[in-house]
Image (spheres, grey):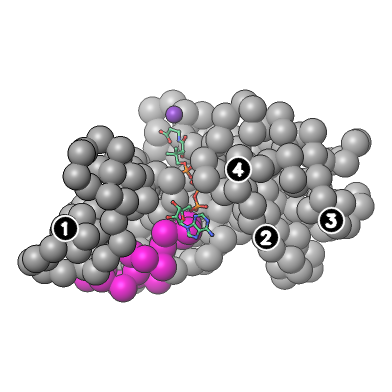
Amino acid sequence: MTIVAIDAGNTRIKWGVRDGGQWLANGALPTADAAALVAVAAGWPRGARIVLCNVAGDAARDAIFGALPAGADLRLFVASAECCGVSNGYARPEQLGADRWAALLGARGRCADACLVVCAGTATTIDVLAADGRFRGGVILPGFDLMRASLARNTAQLPFAEGHFRPAPTNTMDAIVSGCLAAQLGAIERMFAAIAGEPGARCLLTGGAAPRLIHDLNIPAEVAENLVLDGLARYAAAT
Ligand SMILES: Nc1ncnc2c1ncn2[C@@H]1O[C@H](COP(=O)(O)OP(=O)(O)O)[C@@H](O)[C@H]1O
Ligand SMILES: CC(C)(COP(=O)(O)O)[C@@H](O)C(=O)NCCC(=O)O
Ligand SMILES: [K+]
């Protein structure tokens, strides 16, 4: 069965076409240009099962729905109490962001040990997945770009900074970049402490900002591209 998975986040819509256990095509476009998905969707195999994960609000959802072929086999993916070997520890399971839930399903498909699942996007989410498949809970903080943008927007003298990660920065650009990175990395390393002693425990990083964070982490970590799309594909194959 051909599956089209769509991950609509607050910055970008990521999509992938999957068949026979392989990703055949992948792409992304700004969520603000959701209507442009029409041209992309025209190239997808007819009769594919489409699974949409949307955390970008109703307008994005409606724009995406409007861009899809009429009569498509379309499912809106939301968080649930249990799926694909993962149980949801949120007090109200449906409150968990569907992208976080999909990333957890994707992570479970890649590793059976305890895992810290980090989605580095508009926001950064850091979620604890136990070796038994229980999602214990996790944190939300502004993403790396959002932290820098908030300084630029809310201070007189600070620009949106590009710079280097330094232990003791000696210029404004490096000070901003290092402070925002230290906040991201510190949150991840602090959350990792919950599973650090468990055999094979590691951190999986996904999302557009993941390549920026991976280099300076002092824990076992790897970038797992398209973890959300993987989770959506697992869900589509299981339902
Ligand atoms: N080509 C790109 N366009 C936009 N953001 C990008 C791009 N490449 C990397 N990024 C970074 O990734 C973040 C968006 O990542 P993404 O996972 O798509 O977010 P979301 O899921 O919240 O839409 C941006 O905040 C930026 O830091
Ligand atoms: C935290 C998020 C905004 C992250 O979205 P993203 O950065 O991928 O656009 C999203 O997962 C969300 O809207 N969550 C709902 C609240 C929660 O997960 O508790
Ligand atoms: K909001």
Instruction: Give amino acid for label 4.
Output: Thr
Closer to us: 165 or 120? 165
The image quadrant where one finds ligand 2 is top left
Nearer mark to the viewer, of 3 and 1: 1
Q: Quadrant of the C terminus?
A: top right
Please name the residue that numbered disc 4 is placed on. 31
Counting labels gives 4
**At 29% across and 56% down in the image, what residue appears?**
161
Q: Residues within 10 Å of mark 3 (few under 14, many from 20)?
A: some
| Mark closer to the chain start, 4 or 3 | 4
**At 79% across and 33% down in the image, what residue appears?**
66
- The mark found on residue 132 in the picture is none
Instruction: Give amino acid for label 3.
Output: Trp
| Mark closer to the chain start, 1 or 2 | 2
Q: Quadrant of the N terminus?
A: bottom right
Please name the residue that numbered disc 1 is placed on. 172
Q: Which residues are magenta?
A: 204-222
| Mark closer to the chain start, 2 or 3 | 2
Q: Residues within 10 Å of mark 1 (few under 14, many from 20)?
A: some
Please name the residue that numbered disc 3 is placed on. 44
Instruction: Give amino acid for label 1.
Output: Thr
Q: Is mark 3 within 8 Å of ligand 1?
A: no
